Amino acid sequence: MENGGPLKVTLHGFDERARSMLALFLEGPAQGICRLANTPEEAEAAIVDLDGAVPERIWLEFRRKFNGPALVLSATERRLRNAHWVAKPVQLGEFKAAIERVRSQIDAIRTLKRLEEAPAPAAAEQPGSGINLGPLERRFIDIAGDMSDEIYLDISQRERLFYDPHQYIEHTLREGLTLARKDNAPVIFDGLGHNLIFCPTSHRIYTDMREQFLRSLCVQPHTGERIGFRTASSDTLPLIGSSDPRLQRLDSTLWNVSLWTSRGRVPKGTPLNAPIKLLAWPNLTRLTISPHALRIAALWATRPTSLMDTPRLLDVPYRHVFAFYSASLILGLVEPLGGNASPAQVSPSPPPLPSVQNEAQTQRRGLLSRLLAKLGLGLR
Amino acid sequence: MAHYKLIFTGPVGAGKTTAISTLSDVPIVSTEARASDHVAERKPRTTVAMDYGLLRLDGNERVHLYGTPGQERFDFMWDILTEGGLGLILLLDNTRPDPFEDLRHFVEAFRDFIKETHLAVGVTRMDEAPLPGLDSYNEHLSKLGFAAPIFEVDARSRRDVAILVQSLLYMLDPGARG
Ligand SMILES: Nc1nc2c(ncn2[C@@H]2O[C@H](COP(=O)(O)OP(=O)(O)OP(=O)(O)O)[C@@H](O)[C@H]2O)c(=O)[nH]1
Ligand SMILES: [Mg+2]
């Protein structure tokens, strides 16, 4: 068929009678569309009769011999990998259409081979590997604190790993959100010296506070005590256009509030040795990406692991793991399993990650790492 | 040298061609044609056989990026394209009439491939249609028996597409590090 000639086919599963009938069909009405291959090696595609006694056996036997595209003839519809079904009795129009599909498939396979084997085409303008860090992503200390691993491992300093959200504005904001959701109405916060309105239906907040100001409120304990909140009817609110910069995403604000407040700690009472399960991924294209967030999320999604084991398993600082947990918690995306409530001692050593033992796995981990570096967020 | 590939799939107009071109180091090879019949109402050009892009790594190593055609009459291409793939990136268009049906359709069509590898889902055009939200996608996906990273993605943004692909790679091996 290289020059548009008939497609060369081999036959499988046909008894003598069916075979000679098909041969007549190919030499007659289907002439020029396809012909029997002279040798098995020459065949570009196969035609398989699947109305024999045990179709599954016929198919398996066939697939052991031939890997290429196939036309399957049978009275009832068959959906098989890499095969195109034609109903019996065979109509010329349908047969032609199926052969056309096989031809495009063969073309496509050839194109794939050519592309994969071709020397790499000249580079387009390099899109610039690595991604510019947003100002937020640079401020790791703001979002993960600066406690060293020694503090996390020192039993006598255990207290320092926890914070009480009730002492911070985080708690007041969460209560305001609960009210907004319950009444399905906007909630206005008073006593901040600035506007702050939660709009539950649009998942937005409205505020004229600068980010730095909100962050400074999050850091100080007891700020929440002088802040009140109340529901408001929508028509008392300022008219807000959807492109108004004072309108921000609710999830992203809460996420930041939690990072700024926790700074590498977790809420009081969090079990440090219970495996953490990721219930759903945070929307990391639209949230501040805390360091190692993607790796930690992938681990907790595929293999729940405790707060104390995760840093050792992934070889990342404890504070980044704790920060990611607290932020995910405020959005309801993580859950400690098994209710091991006692923040007990550190377990001797975490079970290792699915080990890379054989050559192929090592090779793949290497490739994944190089590819990740190329895509780069600059956030290791 | 081993060849690696990443497969992008999704319905017509979800942003597959765009996503591959934002990542590719080379101008993409795209078998596009003027869209016929009902597709043309949504967009003038559509991919008919596949998209192809390439990421070059140090040491002459390459990762091939393939996009499946969005139109169903080309779905015989899917098996061929996924063979040997590292994983599947599914793009869904939030402005389509029933994006959850699209989700179901593609997850079912690629079920075996996803089971052998991993899946990451990017929901595009959320700037035009903010609803349904990602939580609904998560629910629908878990009803289909899968869990996967699901992000809001603008296929025109390299950062968005890169984060989506990275999440897939970490799912394949959280021990890898960039
Ligand atoms: N507004 C908006 N436009 C987007 C977004 N993502 C992609 N697009 C646009 O959507 C259009 C369709 O994208 P394509 O890349 O051609 O879609 P495709 O999936 O390749 O479509 P087919 O080849 O027909 O299957 C392009 O014009 C993109 O720029 C998004 O998040 N928001
Ligand atoms: Mg396309």
Image (cartoon, rainbow, N blue to C red):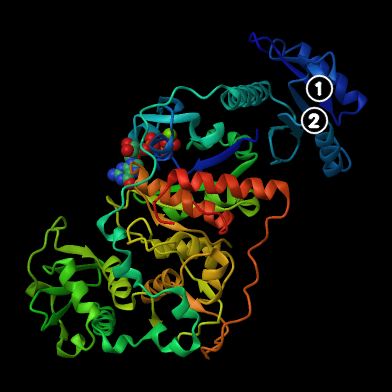
Is A114 situated left or right of A178 in this image?
right
Picture residue at 45% right of the left edge, 27% below the top: B30
Please state which of the two labelled residues, at mark 1 or mark 2, is closer to the viewer: 2
Horizontal relation, residue B146 to residue A99: left or right: left
Residue A172 image offset from top left, x and y in percent: 24, 84
Task: Identify the image quadrant of residue A330.
Answer: bottom left
Where residue A66 is drawn, which disc sits there? 2
Upstream in sequence: badge 1 or badge 2: 1
Contact, CB < 8 Å: mark 1 with mark 2?
Answer: yes
Specify whether residue A132 is in view: yes
Residue behind label 2 places its C-beta within 8 angstroms of ligand 1:
no
User: Element at badge 1?
Assistant: strand
Please tell me whether residue A20 is drawn above or below residue A337 in the rendered image. above
Q: Pinpoint the chain carrying mark 2.
A: A
Q: Which residue is mark 1?
A: A10
| Residue B48 point in image, percent of width and height | 48, 29
As rendered, which of A239 and A174 lies closer to the eye? A174
Inter-mark Cα distance, 1 to 2: 9 Å
The x, y position of residue A210, in whole percent, is 14, 67
The correct choice, above or below, for A35 with respect to B160 in the image is above
Residue nearer the viewer, A310 or B66? A310
The chain that hosts pointer 1 is: A
Say if labels 1 and 2 share a chain: yes
Quarter of the rendering occupied by the N terminus of chain A: top right
Q: Secondary structure at mark 2?
A: loop
